[in-house]
Amino acid sequence: MGEAESQDRPERTRQDSPKKGRPDPLLRKVLSELNRGRGSEAARLLLDVESRSPVPQETDLVEWLSARIGAKPTAKLVDAFVHLPCFYCKKGRSKCETCEGRGYLRDDMICDRCIGLGIERCDFCDGSGWVTIGDIPPDLKSPVLMRRVKIAFARIEGILRRVPSIVSGNRAPASFRNAAQLLINLDRQMGVLENAVTAAKDVTDSQPDRAKEMAKLVRACVRAAVKVWPKATALIQHMANGSRREVEGADSQSGARARAERRAELCESLAASDMLSGTSLERPFLRRAVLDHRARRSASSGRQTEAAEKDEPNAAGKHA
């Protein structure tokens, strides 16, 4: 959703390439921010440069920048776009509008939109915490996508290795929160993968020479997603177990006990869903990509089986 809602960037206009030499005032500001270690500000300034002084259509932006500010500053600028934060949220999350950040509704009903956490996924960046690919200059989209996905893969592997502990008594709420934090971190990486899957088609349409590279990227995202969903389900079940421990240690008449019990029931129902379908953690575009990938593999396997069966009579005739 975040990629679809990104603001349209102005089209580049055809004009003569500026002469090489000292960069124009805006580019000097970009270079100054990079030298001060303020990559995000430099990236935002570059967007301003593009809108005021469009790069010629025939010119690759990376080459254009390298000729004016140097190769190393250009590499830093690309890296700044990789990590450029979303303009509308903090690390992919914002206060849940349904429960107004409380985590529960009236009568102690747990908010199923945020699973009782009080925060929800940002609609603009799809929970990735990074600015949408649609707001990144066209020539930088592919390298930014590749770098972001590589970072997400590394973070996913780290989360997959972590196993939160289950404790009882007064520490039970902490057990729930620890598992919830891992789930939020995991969902953020899933946001990166989903954004890459949806943006890959746009990159392919605008840069056909990158079609194979983007197809390979989508396949890698699908393989990662297949590993992530079982972990997400396990974390939600862990949250349910933590809530059950909280129920055991709470006063039988307290509101906290009632909320913990309802939270446990909600988490247990979510853990039983397929790829979190129908939940606030569902990733519809990534889910579609996974299902399409499975369908293609199934069709390919079926064709191979059919071909092998046709070859069997011929092989038998030869042996006879």
Image: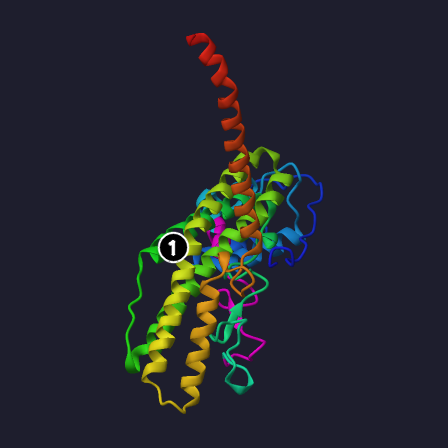
> Looking at the picture, how far across and down is residue 119, in whole percent?
50, 73
Position of the N terminus, as image quadrant, is bottom right
- Residue at 36% x, 71% y is 241
Looking at the rendered structure, the number of numbered marks drawn on it comes to 1
Residues 273 and 125: in front is 273
The answer to whether residue 309 shows anywhere in this view is yes
| Residue in the picture at 48% in, 22% down | 308
User: In the image, 170: left or right of 278?
Assistant: left
Task: Name the residue nearer the viewer: 184 or 252.
Answer: 252
Q: Position of residue 287 (x, y in %)?
A: 54, 52
Q: Amino acid at mark 1?
A: Arg
Q: Is residue 85 magenta?
A: yes
Q: Which residues are magenta?
A: 77-102
- Residue under label 1, please give it: 155
The percent position of residue 3, horizontal first and vertical second, equals 61, 55
Residue 82 drawn in magenta: yes
Name the side, left or right, on which 313 lies relative to 240.
right
Residue 142 percent coordinates (x, y): 53, 43
Q: Is residue 314 left or right of residue 198?
A: left
Magenta stretch: helix, strand or loop mostly: loop
- Is disc 1 placed on a helix, strand or loop? helix
Question: For residue 7, which quarter of the picture?
Answer: bottom right
Q: Residues within 10 Å of mark 1 (few under 14, many from 20)?
A: some
Q: Is residue 22 visible?
A: no
Task: Give 307 or 294, whichever is nearer the viewer.
Answer: 307
Residue drawn 66% across the image and 50% down it = 53
Q: Is residue 274 above or below residue 315?
A: below
Q: How is the image coloured?
A: rainbow
